[in-house]
């Protein structure tokens, strides 16, 4: 009798690849309509208004704030970079630190990396544009690595006496998570005359850096001046490769302040709204458009759009809505979901859409549109207002699918309103 050892069991288990599902929870939860979101916010505000206000000494006491700022400035000048964590927005207090303390000690650059349009290259270009820092002819368009190296070289010169203080809001944001971004920032962070004070809010943010990067220490300013002077004088001794790291000192900066500005660019009505900065495949563009359209489209807005279109357009919308509702019901019955079909979100409605060829034949049979030009003109009115979404499907995007990005219960209400009219 042959018995399987633990080693055999391990290799048998490891031989097969683990399949990761592409279905995520955030795609299954439908986004809130504007009315639902407003109602939820008002309910939350009513509940929190009954609680006693919480005001930390750090925000209300000038003495506590001055002690913190003085300590932080000393730590920066001693060769450390600061990383602030804790619950609540840290934007206002870090901006105040930059205005009241860092601006008096040197140049200050504030980076709002939570913005979706933020790039590391723009940050480096802003540093290069500091008056008198470097020759404008040397700041031509080039790679991010070259920008970072030029900035580092400019602040490594013995003649450069003013230091640079970089305040980065949310250094754990998507634009700064890449390996290239971390490499460029680690080069600046190890410069004796460049100081970084950054905030983090992601619970997994410490995993962005290795222990050696966090524990790295900046070289002494005297050593940097000697190496720079020797290379300038043409000495035979060559400067070693630039050291990289961050030299972090961690500070708990809990403020309990709302993330109003940081979340201004996120779709708060959807679970997946905060991750809009991540890169998506081209095949997911239509799904993203459907989700965003469903979030922005309310039943009231749809009724206003339908009230302004022609009777033929209303008939076309009724035809599409009827087909889509039938597809949702059939899918629910086949899966045995019953009332669970009401939970179908706008991101899942593409599977219940109608092909353009099928829609054209149905529209021609119902005397809504007799040719392709007339049908596309009617659809254009709905597409312009995001009431109808289209996506290319099939091999090479040969087929077109159209659907209404409105959930089942609201779509049924719209259809009932059109039938009553």
Image (spheres, rainbow, N blue to C red):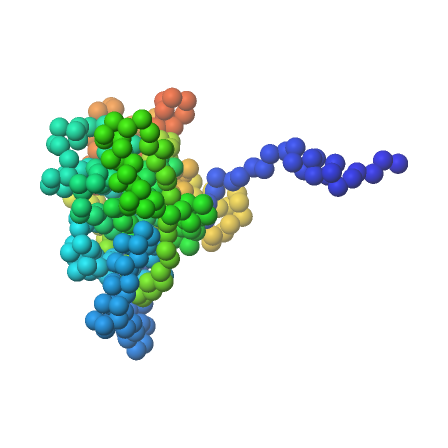
Residue 294 higher or lower than 143, as above or below = below
Q: Position of residue 235 (x, y in %)?
A: 28, 28
Q: Residue at x 47, y 54 (%)?
A: 339
Query: 282 or 152, which lies in front?
Result: 152
Residue 130 as seen in the image, left or right of residue 112: left
Q: Residue at x 37, y 52 (%)?
A: 248
Name the image quarter holding residue 277: top left
Name the image quarter holding residue 367: top left
Q: Position of residue 232 (x, y in %)?
A: 23, 31
Please indicate, yes or no, whether residue 273 appears anywhere in the rendered image.
no
Name the image quarter holding residue 324: top left
Query: 126 or 3, which lies in front?
Result: 126
| Image quarter in which the N terminus is found | top right
Q: Residue at x 30, y 54 (%)?
A: 78
Please indicate, yes or no, whether residue 215 appears anywhere in the rendered image.
yes
Q: How many marks?
A: 0
Q: Residue at x 23, y 50 (%)?
A: 165
Query: 220 or 330, which lies in front?
Result: 220
Q: Position of residue 96 (x, y in %)?
A: 20, 60
Residue 103 higher or lower than 359, as above or below = below
Query: 375 or 187, which lies in front?
Result: 187
Residue 174 as seen in the image, left or right of residue 264: right
Q: Residue furthest right?
A: 1
Q: Position of residue 329 (x, y in %)?
A: 45, 45
């Amino acid at each position: 009798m042959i018995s399987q050892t633990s080693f055999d069991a391990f290799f048998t288990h490891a031989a097969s690849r683990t399949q990761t599902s592409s279905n995520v929870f955030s795609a299954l939860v439908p986004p809130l309509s504007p009315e639902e979101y407003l109602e939820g916010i008002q309910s939350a505000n009513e509940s929190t208004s009954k609680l006693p206000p919480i005001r930390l000494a750090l925000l209300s006491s000038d003495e506590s704030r001055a002690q913190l700022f003085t300590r932080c400035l000393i730590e920066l000048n001693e060769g450390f970079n600061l990383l602030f964590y804790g619950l609540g927005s840290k934007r206002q207090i870090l901006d105040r630190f930059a205005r009241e303390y860092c601006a008096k000690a040197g140049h200050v650059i504030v980076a709002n990396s939570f913005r979706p349009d933020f790039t590391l290259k723009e940050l480096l270009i802003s540093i290069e544009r500091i008056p008198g820092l470097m020759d404008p002819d040397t700041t031509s368009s080039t790679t991010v690595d070259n920008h970072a190296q030029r900035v580092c070289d400019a602040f490594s010169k013995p003649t450069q006496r003013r230091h640079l203080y970089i305040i980065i809001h949310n250094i754990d944001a998507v634009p700064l998570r890449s390996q290239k971004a971390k490499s460029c920032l680690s080069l600046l962070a190890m410069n004796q005359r460049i100081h970084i004070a950054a905030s983090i809010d992601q619970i997994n943010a410490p995993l962005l850096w290795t222990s050696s990067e966090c524990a790295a220490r900046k070289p002494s300013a005297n050593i940097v001046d000697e190496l720079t002077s020797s290379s300038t004088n043409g000495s035979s001794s060559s400067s070693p490769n630039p050291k990289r790291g961050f030299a972090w000192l961690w500070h708990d900066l809990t403020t309990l302040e709302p993330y109003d500005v940081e979340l201004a660019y996120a779709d708060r009505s959807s679970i997946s709204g905060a991750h809009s900065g991540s890169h998506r495949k081209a095949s997911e563009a239509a799904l993203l458009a459907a989700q965003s359209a469903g979030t922005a489209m309310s039943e009231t807005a749809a009724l206003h759009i339908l009230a302004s279109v022609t009777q033929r357009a209303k008939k076309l919308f009724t035809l599409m809505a009827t087909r889509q509702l039938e597809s949702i019901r059939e899918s629910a019955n086949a899966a045995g979901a019953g009332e669970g079909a009401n939970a179908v979100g706008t991101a899942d409605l593409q599977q219940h859409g109608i092909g353009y060829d099928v829609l054209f034949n149905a529209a021609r049979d119902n005397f809504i549109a007799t040719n392709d030009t007339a049908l596309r003109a009617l659809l254009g009115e709905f597409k312009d207002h995001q009431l109808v979404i289209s996506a290319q499907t099939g091999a090479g995007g040969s087929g077109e699918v159209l659907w209404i990005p409105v959930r089942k219960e609201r779509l049924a209400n719209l259809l009932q309103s059109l039938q009553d009219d």
